[in-house]
Image: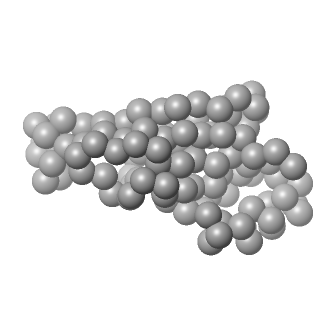
Amino acid sequence: MRELLPELERWRAAGKRAALATVVKAWGSSPRPLGSKMAISDGGDMAGSVSGGCVEGAVYEEAQEVIVRGEPKLLTYGVTDDEAWAVGLSCGGEIQVYVEPLQD
């Protein structure tokens, strides 16, 4: 989280609102460990990481809604072992990401 603080402070100083996404549960293969965080601003900025590829794009989209509505969300993303092989990954896995709005 500390590595995100300077970026969050810049966004706040610029009048941007933000959300924080955190990996809260993981099963099987996961690109990032529990507690990994990604901050997203309403201006389209991102800092940190919760996964990779299409998952982060999906978390970004959900975070935009969280910022607007001011309500947190618990998101689940996963892929089976068979699906993983089909897209070139060695194994499947599932993660839960908690996305919460950051208040001033």
Residue in the foreground of this view, choosing between 38 and 44: 38
Q: Image point 17% across, 52% down: which residue? A: 89
The tally of labels here is 0
Question: How far across and down, in percent of the image, does residue 3 sit?
Answer: 62, 71
Question: How far across and down, in percent of the image, does residue 68 sit?
Answer: 75, 32
Question: How far across and down, in percent of the image, does residue 67 sit?
Answer: 73, 38
Q: Which scheme is used to colour this image of the protein? A: one colour
Horizontal relation, residue 64 to residue 30: left or right: right
Residue in the foreground of this view, choosing between 58 and 26: 26
Q: Image point 66% across, 40% down: which residue? A: 100
Q: Image point 80% across, 65% down: which residue? A: 9
Residue 60 vertical position relative to residue 13 in the rendered view, above or below: above
- The answer to whether residue 88 is seen in the rendering is no
Question: How far across and down, in percent of the image, does residue 76 sit?
Answer: 41, 33
Q: Which of the image's four quarters has the N terminus?
A: bottom right
- The answer to whether residue 81 is seen in the rendering is yes
Residue 25 vertical position relative to residue 49 in the rendered view, above or below: above
Q: Image point 65% across, 32% down: which residue? A: 72
Horizontal relation, residue 49 to residue 63: left or right: left
Residue in the foreground of this view, choosing between 61 and 80: 80
Horizontal relation, residue 15 to residue 90: left or right: right
Q: Quadrant of residue 48?
A: bottom right
Horizontal relation, residue 25 to residue 10: left or right: left
